[in-house]
Every structure is written in structure tokens, then in C-alpha cells.
Image: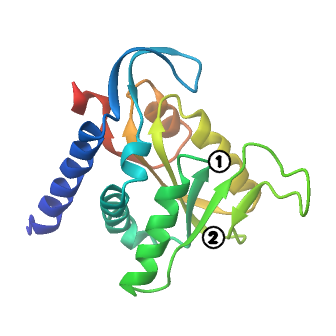
């Protein structure tokens, strides 16, 4: 078996972790998470998703992981998913390996003006969709994005998160019947 691609992926993931640490994206102390839960540690993954090297590495790893899924769109709930989805879509175009993947993002609330959309980007019915997010805690944000994507008549083919806080979100997604994986876990930092 050729260990080359896996070793390359492992090196990229290690570098992603290093960037988070170097840019102080992992902190200890007292924090309140988006879920409302208290925590003794916090991940600011924007330190890597908004870093040119970091987001490029994330896009490479994710695109390699979804290559065989025939995905047509990639995105998730507003904020955390946006830089990841756009980077993967751009790289899918640059690589010229089949049809480029379209990026999208789901709004927190329906737009109150214009076309009053609930999402931005391309979500055609029957699209094969990869949901991405930067951090997974309980899975609430991802499930909200999934609800909108499925309301548009699309099929979820994979969920990939940059970092799983290992607080039940992965189990919630698996129990709901979705294929899920993370690039990093909170335990990788302790």
C-alpha cells in the first residue's frame, strides 16, 4: 500500500495544528462557547482559516478527502465555513480535475431585503453537498446548515470539520446518519 498520500496529508494536518499554536489560536482559561457551554480552553480557528498558508493546507486536505465523492457544492453555516468552502472551491477550479465544486454558505437568518434568501452561493436540487465548519462542539451549527441544504433538495455526502472539541458533536452527527470526520481533535492539543 502506498503511504505517500496519507503521509503528505498527515504532514499538512500537523502544519495546520502548528499554525493554530503559533498564532495563539489555542488558549486556556475561562470561556463561554457559542453553544453557551463553559470551557477551560478555547480554539480560535480563524487564526488558521484566515492565514494564507493555513487555509491553503486545509483546502488541500479536504479536497483530497472528498475527491471520490463527486461533490458539487461545499459550505456550511455562516462564518466558520466560509473561508474553508471558498478555499476548497478555488482549489477545485485550479486543479482542473473534473468539474469545480461550488461554494455556498447558510445564513443565520433569512435576509430581510432583496430576494430574502436563506443562503448564498449555489445549491441546486439534487446537488451532492459537503458540509464544512471550523469547530464542532455539539453539532448545532452543522445541523442548522444541514436542515437548510436538505430543504433545498440536496444530498449531504460528507461532513468535515477542522477541529472537533470532542464534546458530543461527532456522536450527534453520526446518530443522525451523517458521514463525519475531523482534521484535528481537542485532545491533539493537550
Residue at image coords 8%, 67%? 1
* Position of 154 relative to 47 (above/below): below
Disc 1 on helix, strand or loop?
Answer: helix
Task: From the viewer's side, name the closer residue of 106 and 71.
Answer: 106
Mark carried by residue 127: 2
Question: In this figure, which residue is indicated by the disc labeled 1?
Answer: 145
Task: From the viewer's side, name the closer residue of 158 and 28.
Answer: 28
Residue at image coords 84%, 52%? 111
Residue at image coords 47%, 74%? 90
* Position of 154 relative to 68 (above/below): above
What is the quadrant of the C terminus in the image? top left
Residue at image coords 58%, 47%? 79
Q: Please give left or right for residue 107 compared with residue 4 in the image.
A: right
Please identify, in this view, whether the residue under mark 1 or under mark 2 is nearer the observer: 1
* Position of 14 relative to 88 (above/below): above
Q: Residues within 10 Å of mark 2 (few under 14, many from 20)?
A: many
Task: From the viewer's side, name the closer residue of 99 and 45.
Answer: 45
Q: Position of residue 66 (x, y in %)?
A: 39, 66
* Position of 72 relative to 178 (above/below): below
Task: From the viewer's side, name the closer residue of 171 and 26.
Answer: 26
Amino acid at each position: 500500500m502506498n503511504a505517500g498520500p496519507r503521509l503528505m496529508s498527515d504532514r499538512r494536518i500537523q502544519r495546520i495544528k502548528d499554525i493554530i499554536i503559533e498564532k495563539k489560536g489555542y488558549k486556556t482559561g475561562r470561556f463561554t462557547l457559542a453553544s453557551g457551554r463553559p470551557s477551560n480552553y478555547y480554539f480560535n480557528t480563524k487564526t488558521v482559516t484566515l492565514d494564507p498558508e493555513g487555509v491553503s493546507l486545509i483546502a488541500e486536505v479536504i479536497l483530497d478527502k472528498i475527491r471520490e465523492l463527486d461533490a458539487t457544492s461545499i459550505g456550511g453555516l455562516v462564518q466558520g465555513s466560509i473561508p474553508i468552502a471558498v478555499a476548497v472551491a478555488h482549489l477545485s477550479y485550479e486543479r482542473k480535475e473534473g468539474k469545480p465544486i461550488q461554494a455556498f454558505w447558510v445564513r443565520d437568518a433569512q435576509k430581510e431585503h432583496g430576494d430574502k434568501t436563506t443562503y448564498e452561493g449555489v445549491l441546486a436540487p439534487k446537488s451532492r453537498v459537503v458540509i464544512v465548519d471550523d469547530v464542532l462542539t455539539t453539532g448545532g451549527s452543522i445541523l442548522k446548515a444541514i436542515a437548510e441544504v436538505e430543504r433545498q433538495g440536496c444530498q449531504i455526502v460528507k461532513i468535515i470539520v477542522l477541529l472537533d472539541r470532542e464534546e458530543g458533536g461527532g456522536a450527534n452527527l453520526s446518530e443522525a446518519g451523517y458521514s463525519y470526520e475531523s482534521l484535528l481533535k481537542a485532545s491533539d492539543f493537550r
